[in-house]
Amino acid sequence: MSKGLTRQGQDAKSRITKYLAGDKIQLNSEEEKILTRWEFAYDLMVAKEKNWVEIRDKIAFKFAVSKFTAENDISNTQEVFGTNRKINKRFVLHLHLDRMDVDIERIRKGLFFSKDEDGKLQPCTPDAKEIAALAKFAEAYTYTVNCIPDDVDRSKLPPPLFIFNLPEGAALVPPMTLEQALTKADEYIEFQDLSHEQSDIQPDGSTGSGEDPADPAHDDQVSSSE
């Protein structure tokens, strides 16, 4: 029974992986539930607001599954989404940039607005140090933007270059021109014609089939033909 459940889980993981990769796969209801849990786990991990135990407990509570299942969900989420969503340098920089943007907006509101006794926001004037700190944060934000690699326009890439390694001592022969090819063809044809002519020359220097007209066998063949 346990082997069957394990095999079923592996099949679901494989199908979901192919589905996220863009394959035309129709997930069944159980696989859609699993994918929903994994997407929820992914969002929690990206937010970085909760630790591993808190994420596990939140999955178990929200979807009414065991903590063991929630732990497997976290592990599978890291493997499947890490492969298909390509968590690489570009991805990490985008996440970092998003968090910096949120932090800058929060700090900006704190510098230029403050709450009065009634809890309402009122404009205020920050001091020079606070303005300098905000400027440094904005500078770091700009630096992060410039670190994100641009998308490559493959239509403007140069044509591929093929490099061939010749065996030692071999030379690369350039292709023939049309005139050279025709000349070579004529030489080959003349050689073939000359070879056929030489094959008809008999040992005594005569030409023909090599049959002796004085041979009685030859006379018998001639008379029989008559």
Image (spheres, grey):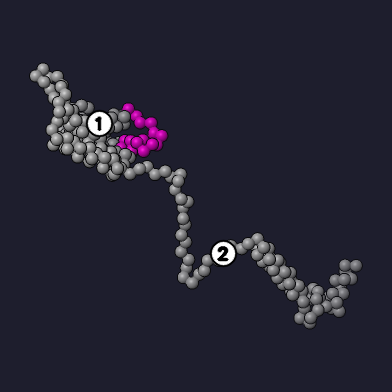
Quarter occupied by residue 80: top left
Quarter occupied by residue 68: top left
Residue 223 shown left or right of residue 143 in the figure: right
Asked if residue 216 can be seen in this view, the reply is: no
Residue at image point 84% right, 74% down? 218
Q: Is residue 133 above or below residue 165?
A: above
Q: Quadrant of the C terminus?
A: bottom right
Residue behind mark 1: 40
**Disc 2 from disc 1: Cα separation:** 63 Å
Total marks shown come to 2
Residue at image point 41% right, 34% down? 24
- Residue 105 lies in the magenta stretch: no
| Label 2 Cα crowd, 10 Å radius (few <14 / some 14-19 / many 20+) | few
Segment tinted magenta in the rendering: 12-29
**Nearer the observer, 174 or 112:** 112
Q: Position of residue 31 (x, y in %)?
A: 31, 31
Asked if residue 100 can be seen in this view, the reply is: yes
Q: Quadrant of the N terminus?
A: top left
| Label 1 Cα crowd, 10 Å radius (few <14 / some 14-19 / many 20+) | some
Q: Is residue 34 above or below residue 181?
A: above
Q: Which disc is residue 90 wearing?
A: none
Residue at image point 49% right, 72% down? 169
Q: Amino acid at mark 2?
A: Pro
Q: Amino acid at mark 1?
A: Phe
Q: Position of residue 101 (x, y in %)?
A: 24, 34
- Residue 26 lies in the magenta stretch: yes
Residue behind mark 2: 174
